[in-house]
Amino acid sequence: MAAGAVEAAEAAAAVAEVGSARQFEELLRLKAKSLLVVHFWAPWAPQCVQMNDVMAELAKEHPHVSFVKLEAEAVPEVSEKYEISSVPTFLFFKNSQRVDRLDGAHAPELTKKVQRHVSSGSFTPSANEHVKEDLNLRLKKLTHAAPCMLFMKGTPQEPRCGFSKQMVEILHKHNIQFSSFDIFSDEEVRQGLKTYSNWPTYPQLYVSGELIGGLDIVKELEASEELDTICPKAPKLEERLKVLTNKASVMLFMKGNKQEAKCGFSKQILEILNSTGVEYETFDILEDEEVRQGLKTFSNWPTYPQLYVRGELVGGLDIVKELKDNGELLPILKGEN
């Protein structure tokens, strides 16, 4: 066997494959004492295939780390349990507990996270300082990720503690535009932000990267009518959705974008639209939870992708397939129907 073929075979062997929920649970138990990195992937997504190659390289560099790939759509019970809505997604486990997550094909960030988790608990002082500096830079970026950032337990749609739920209700009541970060999704951020902000509890609200405080502070600001002057106001969601659905003559709301579909249905509808030669724009609903949830009500259509022509909903993948088969799709896309 040629040297290159031997290397490829060794790399493939270094990344295990899981084919069932039972096998996955067994693996969590067996690998409890080591770092386990799981790649939720799909064979139809080229970015996933590339990231499998990255995983193979990392497996060679870190022989004490367990690297696993799991086909997300083939083992739906595991994907649903860990809220995998797009591929590629990477989950990190230690002691059978999820400790970190990475969404998207970001090879440098995946490498950094693996190195960070490998080194945690066994640093030299200089390595410890380096990791701490990296974390502070990351926290600075996160607190500045939007004009108003809420670090909470859960998401605005599904808060996972009473204080986070109350904070979301106050912000919504005052029509305040904010983005959020689920601290349960990243243990490093959860612990690091307490030190970074010198604030020991959650939720935490930031405006322009500066800590405003927790729930009690926000309640005080609401009572003194200062909250509305501190936090940026959101345009009404319905107005925003009208603007978005009319942004181009043909608008596709999907998981991912033109270059990188993140679910099988979105990939199929892209292929159909590309075959028509008609110009269209896309919106990645994974990037904006408010749009993702709001558009379902706005259009009275519960799933994605959704295709709009001149601001009017055409439908999802099944409707688009049907229109194509009937020869009606092209005239609709061109605005002739």
Image (cartoon, helix red, strand yellow):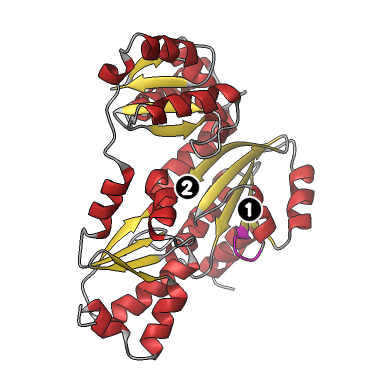
Badge nearest the viewer, 2 or 1: 1
Q: Nearer the viewer, residue 305 or 47?
A: 305
Residue shown at the point (42%, 27%) measured from the top left: 150
Work out which quarter of the rendered image holds the N terminus and state it.
bottom right
Decide: marks 2, 1 in contact (CB < 8 A)? no
Q: Main secondary structure of the magenta part?
A: loop
* Viewer-nearest residue: 225 or 13: 225
Q: Is residue 269 magenta?
A: no
State the image coordinates of residue 197 (x, y, percent, origin top left).
43, 13
Secondary structure of the residue carrying numbered label 1: helix
Q: Decide: is 190 above or below 81.
A: above
Q: Residues within 10 Å of mark 2 (few under 14, many from 20)?
A: some
Residue 169: x %, y % from top left:
47, 28
Q: Which residue is mark 2?
A: 103
Kind of residue at badge 2? Asp
Q: Which residue is mark 1?
A: 80
Q: Is residue 154 visible?
A: yes
Q: Which quarter of the figure is the C terminus placed in?
A: bottom left
**304 lies left or right of 21:** left
Helix, strand or loop status at disc 2 = strand
Up-down relation of residue 97 to residue 312 (above or below): above
Q: Quadrant of residue 5?
A: bottom right
User: The magenta stretch spans which residues?
Assistant: 70-74
Residue 24: percent from the left, percent from the top? 73, 53
> Is residue 218 depicted above or below 301 in this figure?
above
